[in-house]
Amino acid sequence: MTRRVAILISGRGSNMVALAQSMTGDHPARPCLVVSNRPGAAGLTAARDLGIPAALVDHTEFPDRAAFEAQLTATLERARPDIICLAGFMRILSPGFVGRWQGRILNIHPSLLPKYKGLDTHARALAAGDTEAGCSVHLVTPELDGGPVLGQARVPILPGDTPEILAQRVLGQERLLYPAVLRRFAEGDQAPIFLP
Ligand code: GRF
């Protein structure tokens, strides 16, 4: 049976586009909804251009996280997703929300987890003098960026790199890794993938 995938974004949505464009042919999943928590997110337009239903749940319109998540849950429940992909979604999700969709939420994080959970990953990798960086797709658990890793891709850190240059290099791998992991996950296989 075709798996239904909802994708949560906050901005540009390049990972969302890579995921959506991968779900064709004999892929076991199809996108059913894109949700942004930010009204200006370029990814909302990109989703509509791809013919995917797109919704806005603006967190600033709710008094607290619980109210925001209640609306997010209601919006998702109407789309009946089997899998939820966080793709540049910049809100922390409560244990209650994560529990509602337990074992079915994936996230992409721009570091080689368990290194550099949280923000500013590229600046932190450069400041530490690391020689490589990368990205990780992991299952979402209540611990921030702490769930089991389902895939990783590595890139070299080169002389003269800035956080912006490194982010671009890592993003190129994110767009390969996330679709590869999603496909395998939708097939019911949670063995981690390591690229390249
Ligand atoms: C990506 O680098 C992702 O890993 C991070 O935020 C960025 C989102 O980019 N969490 P996009 O919106 O998918 O283009």
Image (cartoon, helix red, strand yellow):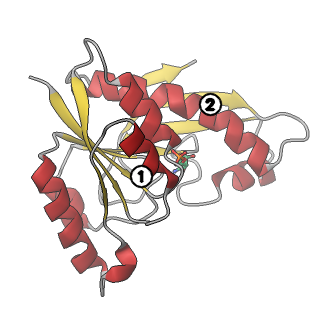
Crowd band around label 2 with a 10 angstrom C-alpha radius: few (<14), some (14–19), many (20+): some
Q: Quadrant of residue 85?
A: top left
The image shows a total of numbered marks equal to 2
Query: Residue 67 sits in which quadrant?
Result: bottom left
Q: Which mark is residue 44?
A: 1
Q: Is residue 192 visible?
A: no
Q: Please, what is the three-letter code of the amino acid marked with disc 2?
A: Gly
> Which numbered tag is attached to residue 172?
2
* Coordinates of residue 165 in the picture (x, y in percent): 78, 42
Residue 106, x across and y down, in percent: 33, 43
160 left or right, relative to 133: right
Residue 144, percent across and down?
41, 59
Q: In the rendered view, would you say 159 is above or below 179?
A: below
Q: Nearer the viewer, residue 38 or 181?
A: 38
Q: Quadrant of the N terminus?
A: top left
Q: Amino acid at mark 1?
A: Leu
Q: Marks 2/1: CA distance?
A: 21 Å
Identify the secondary structure beneath mark 1.
helix
In the figure, 91 relative to 132: above or below?
below
Observer-nearest residue: 194 or 175?
175
Task: Say which mark, if any, is on residue 66.
Answer: none
On-image quarter of the C terminus: top right
Disc 1 crowd rating (10 Å Cα; few below 14, some 14-19, many 20+) is: many
Q: Earlier in the sequence, mark 2 or mark 1?
A: 1
Q: Residue furthest top?
A: 26
* Residue shown at 84% from the left, 42% from the top: 161
**Label 2 residue SS:** helix
